[in-house]
Amino acid sequence: MRNLTWQNRSSVSEFILLGFSSQPGMQLLLFTVFLAIYLAILFGNSLIFALIRIDSHLHMPMYFFLANLSFLDISYTTTTVPQMLLHLLSKKKSISYTGCIIQMYIFLSLGITECILYTVMAYDRYMAICHPLHYTLIMSRSVCVKKAASSWMGGFFFAMVHTSVNMRLPYCGPNEINHFFCEVPAILKLACADTRVTEVVVFVMGVILLMIPVFLILVSYVFILMAILRISSVEGRFKAFSTCTAHITMVTLSYGAAMFMYMRPASSYAPERDKYFSFFYSVVSSLLNPLIYSLRNKDVKGALVKLMGKK
């Protein structure tokens, strides 16, 4: 019913996604590269997810949240990349109005869930390093499940609010989106109404959904750093900090690009530049996630070696 209401406010029945290039030769090259990246994302994150499920040594809170992150990355990229690959091989590059709403909603849901999950993972590292004696008691299986479920529910709830605000605007034409998927800043440019209030709402939601998690993550790492500095041995400090480096790296990469996209004036929007930033934080970060976590984590590498040995 809500989709019908939104569609009644717009004379546009579909959008045209311009993607990255209109040159046939370049499109074939991009298809090959993006397909390779997508398959690597599926393989890498599926492997991490499977290792955590199979190996009993990885049945710990940190890896439980990492398995959620891997599943998120698979879902995140599957929301946009298959359609982008199809458009690179097809002359028709359209997406229906309703399909655009659904894609925007799912993309936002998974993105916001990831932001919340990174905050939960920072809290997990804080408990493990600052309160090691109470860690297993406080971060029990049921608590971890509740925190993960809350992250998912929070993501889908805030995405509903975000999507509702954006799609209440009328879209009368043109209908060409200079992007490879239906992302909020690109869609707002096509609205045939004053978007200033909507842009303020998007900015405020960006502050709430990006800056508050970043603040909580920073606070967690301040306490973690203080606890690490109290460790007498250099080896102990290195071991404690090494459990956080992968998380810090991924937070920096993901939040940096997302903040650039959602926390700036609409006047600074540049389609050609911004779709590459979107590709980075929505696709490349999902590719790097299993590499960073596996290369920097002895437990994951050990589980992989054990699995290969069994094979």
Image (cartoon, grey):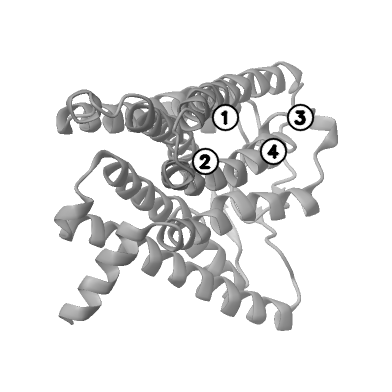
Q: Is label 2 in contact with label 1 (beta carbons under 8 Å)?
A: yes
Q: Which residue carries the number 2 mark?
A: 104
Would residue 216 be found to the left or right of residue 281 on screen?
Answer: left
Calculate the distance from the C-alpha at mark 1 to the C-alpha at mark 3. 20 Å
Report x, y in % for residue 49. 28, 57
Q: Is label 4 in contact with label 3 (beta carbons under 8 Å)?
A: yes
Calculate the distance from the C-alpha at mark 2 to the C-alpha at mark 4. 15 Å
Mark seen at residue 264: 3
Report x, y in % for residue 252. 61, 42
Calculate the distance from the C-alpha at mark 4 to the C-alpha at mark 3. 7 Å
At label 4, the amino acid type is Met
Which residue corresponds to the image point at 52% horizontal and 74% vertical from the top-left? Answer: 35
Q: Which residue carries the number 4 mark?
A: 261
Secondary structure at badge 1 equals: helix
Q: Is residue 278 above or below residue 265?
A: below
At label 1, the amino acid type is Met
Q: Which residue carries the number 1 mark?
A: 167
Please identify, in this view, whether the residue under mark 1 or under mark 4 is nearer the observer.
4
Secondary structure at badge 3 equals: loop
Q: Which residue lies furthest to the front in this view?
A: 232
Please identify, in this view, whether the residue under mark 1 or under mark 3 is nearer the observer.
3
